[in-house]
Image (cartoon, rainbow, N blue to C red):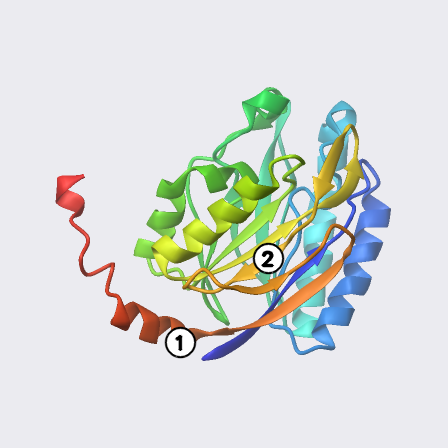
Amino acid sequence: MSLIKAAAIQFNVKQGDVDANLAYVREALYRVAGEGVDLVVLPEMWSSGFAYKNLNELALRTAGIVDELLLLSRELKLVIVGSMPEPNGDKVFNTIYVADNGVLAGIYRKIHLFSLLGEDRAFSGGDSWLLADTSIGKVGVIICYDLRFPELSRRLAIEGAQVICVPAQWPKPRQEHWRTLLRARAIENQLFVVACNACGTIGKLDFFGMSMIIDPKGELLAEAGESGGEIIAELDMQAMIDWRTQIPCFNDRKPELY
């Protein structure tokens, strides 16, 4: 596909309230599908939030939610990317499920756990990256804190990613880190970035939203404010190819020297 329409669905994730979060996302998916969207990115841990006290119990709901997402993705002809808790013994994984027109195109378990907020105590870390071969092209995925580790995004780009999707719960006051790192990942890898952050107060943290869709030159195609809602933008794949031809960074790499 030469032109892809992408959306980020930014909202205030209700911590521990799976039914409320699912109801919001369900309605939002119908809204963006009505706008002709092909790719949708949801926030990190969108179904439950980081409800540590009953996270294992909430994770048991995830399989059923994935089934519903698959049905919705088929009905609405969408690729849907977002992370939820996946059961794993006495811990859970923070897992992205890529639903593609009724098919599970892949899963990614968050590799880099944010120890500052104790993620490593409640979650198991993933051990592999994901480049999903979807109906709209090659989609790479990372989760929130992964953004601070450029090696992961570069690996996805080298493997052929055209878009990197970033579900997140990135809190105040690190707005400028969020903005700068997202643009850097797009610029250095010459690809599109679709990043969806949570907004509002969740537990003890405040989230600033600012979901973004960024082109391979680092230019903002769409940006949200601090309240809930959807942003939508077109991703021009031919323009990405032309830009990579104009400035052939990948051809000029010297990986044997670093």
What residue is rendered at 63% in x and 39% in y?
A: 170
- Residue 189 in the image, given as x and y percentages of width and height: 36, 56
Q: Give, as a three-letter code, the residue at label 1.
A: Ala
Q: Is residue 51 above or below residue 102?
A: above
Q: Name the one closer to the observer, 41 or 150.
A: 150
Residue 131: horizontal and vertical position, in percent? Answer: 42, 55
The structure residue drawn at horizontal position 86% and vertical position 48%, both measured from the top left corner, is 20
- Looking at this view, is 114 or 70 the one in front? 114
Residue holding disc 1? 239
Image coords of residue 50 (percent x, y): 71, 32
**From the viewer's perspective, is residue 43 above or below residue 237?**
above
Task: Specify the label residue 204 is tagged with.
Answer: none
Label 2, on which residue? Answer: 212
Label 1 or label 2, whichever comes before in sequence order: 2
Q: CA distance from mark 1 to mark 2?
A: 19 Å
**Point 82% across, 56% down: residue:** 24
Q: Residue at x 65, y 51 (%)?
A: 210
